[in-house]
Image: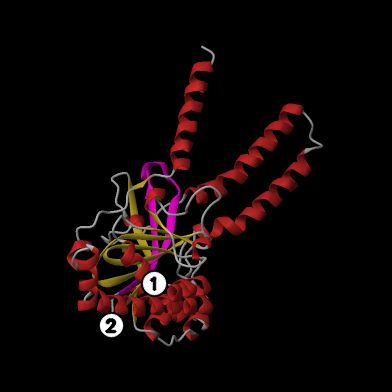
Amino acid sequence: MRLDTRPLIARVDRQAREQLRRRYPERKRLPDLRSLYYAVLPVLWIASVMSITASEGSHAKAPPAWILGSLFIGLHLKRVLPFFRTSDRRRCRLKGFADANGFWYDITRHSPDYPGMIFARSSWGESEIRDRFERRSGPTLDIGDHQRRKLPFLAARVHRWGYVMMRLPVPLPHIVLDSRRNNSLFHSDLPEAVGRHQRVSLEGDFDRHFTLYCPVGAERDALYLFTPDVMARFIDTAAGLDVEIVDDHLFLYSPGGIITTDPAAWERLMETVEAVEEKVARWGRWRGSPMRETADAEDGVGSPRAAITAPRLRTHPHVWYQATWLVVIVTCVVWFLSAPR
């Protein structure tokens, strides 16, 4: 697919921005704890400095305190403002890019009912899609930034993942390809951890870049889909992407978001999508071929229908998440017991 990336860097006039506002009226965004943090922290800083200065009874220290406070606020303004304003120019460019390349574009949509782990619903949170691209014709392709916030009444931090969704010709077992590049120091950046006993070694030295997980009995499907040529393409163009296959859905995940106005980033992403789609088409022909069915029968694997009833991967919350809550609870208990009565 040859992309027309010119709209991503085109000049946007006022008339185009007004038309965009009329077509896509602004909806309420999920609040983010960081916006509250960056807005309140400078105020607390000034209040603390004034309180200390007043308690010491020294007015000579007041001017330096105000200077420091002003510098502090100035440094934070750049980070506060993006949370309280919308980028109409960016959206106009994205809309033009979508129109030029055969996509439907929407600024805000409710989270779709996809089976991927980032789309898991919870009664204690809410989620939405920002800047969603859906291919108008051809194989299903859905691209967007998914935002999920747990504990809405506490204005908890919004978790963001960019995603790409493609449909498979037939259902597959649950498979996860975890990129090592986007992992944190002690854990994967995926919303859920996968048990290590479900790990499968990749061919060559690709284990240094990715970790592959699949249920017992699904190794052949996983290794056929993620062959050395596909893995090499992932390393070159999408080493920071995670992959999840659930039933007949294939997802690519990017922590922090995937939608951008960078032409080079879109070209790299679509190169990866084309490589995966080509491999999926070949895999569909291979899986339904008589040679595959004969080989499965000889190996005792079973028919392609066995993939539909294959077990899912066993996932669990990250240990660091559980440890954080444990530390918070213990700290609260200790503080309560040690408080003077």
Type of amino acid at the residue the image marks with label 2: Gly
Q: Nearer the viewer, residue 224 or 174?
A: 224
- Asked if residue 195 can be seen in this view, the reply is no
Quadrant location of residue 172? bottom left
Circle 1: is it few (<14), some (14-19), or many (20+) Cα within 10 Å?
some
For residue 87, the mark is none
Please tell me which residue is depicted at 33% across the width and 51% down the height of the picture: 126
Residue 9 is a magenta residue: no
- Which residues, given as a range, are shown in magenta? 141-164
Circle 2: is it few (<14), some (14-19), or many (20+) Cα within 10 Å?
few
Residue 163 is a magenta residue: yes
**What is the CA distance from the residue labelled 1 to the residue labelled 2?**
30 Å
SS of the residue under disc 1: helix
According to the picture, the residue beneath numbered tag 2 turns out to be: 138
Is the residue 312 above or below the residue 90 in the image?
Answer: above
Residue 45 percent coordinates (x, y): 65, 41
Please tell me which residue is depicted at 68% across the width and 32% down the height of the picture: 51
